[in-house]
Amino acid sequence: MEYIEIEKNLVPYRFDVDLDGEMFTFEVNYNPTHDFFTVDLERDGEVLIRGEKLVYGVPLFTDVWDSRFPTPTIIPWDLSGLSQTVTWDTLSVTVFLYMPSEGDESE
């Protein structure tokens, strides 16, 4: 299963990622007071969403999705089953932003 790599030691930072042949810019931010991460999403310089909170097991962008958003579902998930939250201690350790494809049994 594919995932989007988050380099939390660089936060806040921006990076481009190709999702199904479309280029998107992610900006990852961290709230140390409440120990959570958010992402901003842009496509072709257009801001699609700001401050989308990474919530374990909840697909990103579902509340606002339209045809401008990435086609693959992106879900913060831990395939090992060790974590059920997205925190500084779990992101990019056991929790990753997975993009399940048909036939994946992680959901």
Image: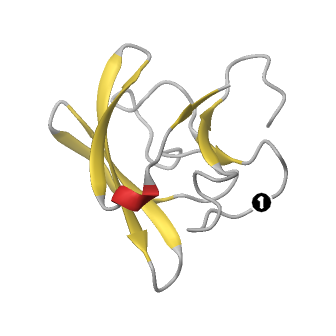
Which scheme is used to colour this image of the protein? Answer: secondary structure
- The residue drawn where x is 18% and y is 39% is 46
- The residue drawn where x is 33% and y is 19% is 22
In the picture, which quadrant includes the N terminus? top right
Identify the residue position indicated by label 1 in the image. Answer: 83
- The residue drawn where x is 76% and y is 61% is 84
10 up-or-down from 87: above or below: above
In the picture, which quadrant includes the C terminus? top right
The residue most toward the bottom is 33
Asked if residue 51 shows in the view, the reply is: no
SS class, disc 1? loop
* Residue 89 placement: quadrant: bottom right
Query: Considering depth in this image, is 39 or 6 the residue closer to the camera?
Result: 6
* Residue 43 placement: quadrant: top left
What's the amino acid at mark 1? Ser
In the rendering, at what x and y percent does residue 81 appear?
Answer: 85, 51
In the rendering, at what x and y percent does residue 53 appear?
Answer: 49, 61
Q: How many marks?
A: 1
46 lies left or right of 56: left
